[in-house]
Amino acid sequence: MGNFYTTVQVLDNQKLGSKRFTEEFCKKMADAGYAVCGSDECEQSYILHFAENSSWVAIASEEYTSDGQKVREDAPRFAKMLKAPCVTTNVIDSDCAVMDAYGATGKKLDTLIMGRADDYFGDDYPDPSEKPWGMFLADGTTWERFMEVRNGDYTFVEDGLAELAPLIGMDSSNIGFTSEDAIADDDTVFLYFKSAGKKPKKLTLNAAFKQVFGQALEPLGFKLVKSKYPYFVRVINDEIAHVITLTSEKSCGTNTFIIYGGIATIYKQEIDFSRDPKFDAGDWLCDIGIFYKKAFPVDYSRKQEIIMARYFINDLNDCEKVYECFSVALERVKQWILPELEKVVDVDSAIRFLFRFAPPRLFINQEAVQFDGAIFYNESYLYLKAKQLDNLLEERKEFLTKCQEFDKKIWNKEPSFDPEIFISEIRQNVKQLINNKKSIENAEVNAERNALILKNL
């Protein structure tokens, strides 16, 4: 499957550059009744991304969903507002995309369909018209070349879009820019707007999360990290971070959020709270449902796991309902996540936690074992810091054995590996790691850097 997304490009035909274009965008939004504000109080948010040697500015938003509804509303509005042509790109399947061109008056000019479109539009869909698309063609590019690329056969349509983009003056990577790609750098501008009138402020999921969870977590030692994303972090003994965070999305008019918890130690390859938690969900971050499930390793309710994992809100203007929903999630966090995090106070308890909730984090990569100076790409360096590693490995072996016995009894599932051999291999790898002086030295340097990050939160 491909990466489904939707985005809009605006032509900076006056060649304003990033600073002046941003100022003009904000001015036009003000003329439309929206004032610049902070992220916690915004009603609309946009991310502008500028690319070198391109006159097109990519605009993304967390509200842009794969159905393309919001971007179809914004594109003609931006075109008319900025008096500049706009092009939307909507990847609707891994091998199919739709691009719509709008003129400076906001009028839709033409549609370009790229990739395997017959499943969506039938066999009789029109080719793009040369007149509207031709005015965007870069110097030296012919219409024939444009159509050749458009008609190309691509496994993933993103590859075709990347090839098509320079032909109309766009940047190859910018054509696929989304809010999930956004990082704070010189080419990216985050903008937040609220109504300048007396319209009631719409509550955001991030703001509700910070308010409801902040009141409960901050007295427990958690701190809201300064980041685009909402992370509450509690640092233990300068080497372990307890983390509670949120991911959210909007689809078909419904707002959805998921609460995640997890631990990060300074022995990770990288601690980065500017990173979208969606990228780490299912890795070292687990949702409430998973914490519930792990409390009953051989007997739990799948229905309850699903109910606890995901939360739905139809109307963000109904503040009472929003706060009520987050309060329910908070009570479940108190019941299932916080008690597990509170057990993690040192390296040994961190290993015990990761064995249960994120075992791949403790997988020993063979490069670190075999090659002097190879990095530990997860947190397997914790093995070398453990005080009672033999006991921890015995616990793990007993747990794996019980799980296999249960699977055999209930599901008649044969074991896929021998826990005794598995734990023996870990012991052997740890012995080899002890002799890999350069890798250990690199890990210590990395740990010092991560410790400084936690200290400065």
Image: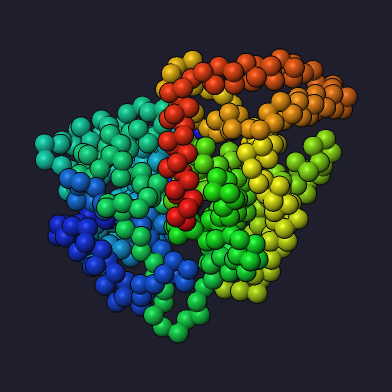
Quick one: which residue is furthest to the left in this view?
140
Query: Closest to the observer: 141 or 359?
Result: 359
Q: Position of residue 381 (x, y in %)?
A: 55, 30
Q: How many marks?
A: 0
82 relative position to 2: left or right: left
- The residue sitting at 62% across, 69% down in the picture is 215
Q: Can you say whether 345 is above or below 423 in the image? A: below
Q: Can you say whether 213 is above or below 123 in the image? A: below
Q: Quadrant of residue 150?
A: top left
* Residue 301 seen in the current view: yes
Query: Closest to the observer: 323 or 73?
Result: 323
Q: Position of residue 78 (x, y in %)?
A: 30, 63
- The residue sitting at 54% across, 21% down in the picture is 434
Q: Can you say whether 123 is above or below 439 in the image? A: below
Query: Closest to the observer: 92 or 399?
Result: 399
Q: Quadrant of residue 253?
A: bottom right
42 relative position to 138: left or right: right
